[in-house]
């Protein structure tokens, strides 16, 4: 299991939060260029991009493509607790009971799917992520990074900034159990194929405007993978024990397994 150290994109967020809090950044200022910030913090440019995307969701920055003085990310507001609350959620998420994280995912993502199915949502980015997940071969960590982005993109497509921020805030905890499961499952390729099919079913139900089906697909997708993770893991060492105890405790509370094809 991960040791709770901040992920690279969290490090970027913490730096930007400190700059805002201490007055080094203010509305109208532009963020340090991506390449330079990545070098300063010793992280990859993709981590900087991920952090900026979260800041966009929170309404803290606005980005513009191209070159020149208007390009890049500009601070548009000073967060009044919003960014700080998000970062505290990131920290606290490491201590949340795993079952609470999973139940929260079900509540949030089922509502997102239902709402998307009842609106004419733009699913262009979501579909692009699904296409990227079809690439072969993808290492489990690459697949799961796209998986996390898929779920975040659905939340963003709903237009609800609070839900998007909550999903982003819980992301590190979500990644912990998805990656732990991938490492222990008997056949990752088989699981990856199943997850691809389930993602497509969710998007298809949303695109058809079938709100009940979309909700059911999301619920089954989250709880079935959680069940598989719990069954695959065993407390082989002290680091795993607390995770497995929490996971196994909730296996019986997941929805019955069924084929939604």
Image (tube, helix red, strand yellow):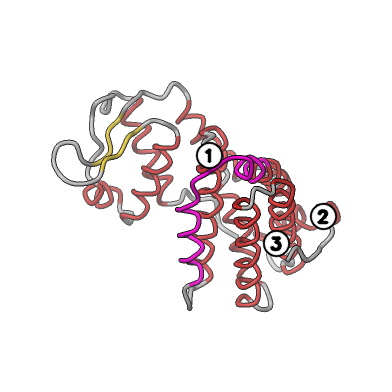
Residue 214 screen position, x and y as percent: 68, 51
Q: Are marks 2 and 1 in contact (CB under 8 Å)?
A: no
Reply yes or no: does residue 179 show up in magenta. no
Q: Which residues are magenta?
A: 111-134
Q: Name the mark on residue 255.
A: 2
Q: How many marks?
A: 3
Q: Name the mark on residue 164.
A: 1
Q: Is residue 77 positioned above or below 243 on the image?
A: above
Q: Main secondary structure of the magenta part?
A: helix
Query: Which residue is labeled 3 in the image?
Result: 225
Q: Quick one: label 1, few (<14), some, or many (20+) residues within 10 Å?
A: many
Q: Quadrant of the C terminus?
A: bottom right
Q: Quick one: label 3, few (<14), some, or many (20+) residues within 10 Å?
A: some
Residue 245 screen position, x and y as percent: 77, 56
Residue 160: quadrant of the picture = top right
Q: Is residue 142 positioned above or below 57 on the image?
A: below
Q: Are marks 3 and 1 in contact (CB under 8 Å)?
A: no
């Amino acid at each position: 299991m991960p040791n709770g150290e901040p992920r690279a994109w969290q490090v970027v967020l913490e730096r930007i939060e400190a700059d805002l809090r201490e007055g080094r950044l203010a509305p109208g200022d532009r963020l340090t260029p991506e390449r330079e910030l990545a070098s300063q913090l010793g992280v990859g440019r993709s981590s900087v991009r991920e952090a900026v995307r979260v800041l966009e969701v929170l309404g803290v920055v606005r980005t513009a493509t191209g070159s020149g003085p208007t390009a890049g990310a500009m601070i548009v507001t000073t967060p009044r607790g919003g960014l700080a609350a998000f970062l505290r959620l990131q920290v606290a998420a490491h201590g949340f009971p795993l079952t609470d994280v999973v139940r929260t995912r079900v509540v949030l993502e089922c509502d997102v799917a239902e709402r998307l199915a009842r609106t004419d949502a733009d699913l262009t980015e979501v579909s692009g992520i699904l296409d990227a997940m079809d690439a072969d071969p993808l290492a489990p960590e690459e697949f799961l990074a796209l998986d996390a982005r898929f779920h975040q993109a659905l939340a963003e497509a709903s237009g609800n900034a609070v839900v998007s921020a909550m999903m982003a805030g819980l992301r590190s905890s979500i990644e912990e159990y998805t990656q732990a499961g991938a490492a222990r499952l008997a056949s990752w390729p088989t699981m990856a194929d199943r997850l691809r099919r389930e993602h497509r079913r969710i998007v298809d139900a949303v695109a058809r405007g079938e709100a009940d089906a979309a909700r059911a697909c999301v619920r089954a997708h989250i709880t079935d993978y959680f069940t598989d993770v719990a069954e695959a893991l065993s407390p082989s060492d002290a680091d795993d024990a607390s995770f497995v105890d929490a996971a196994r405790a909730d296996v019986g509370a997941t929805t019955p397994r069924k084929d939604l094809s």
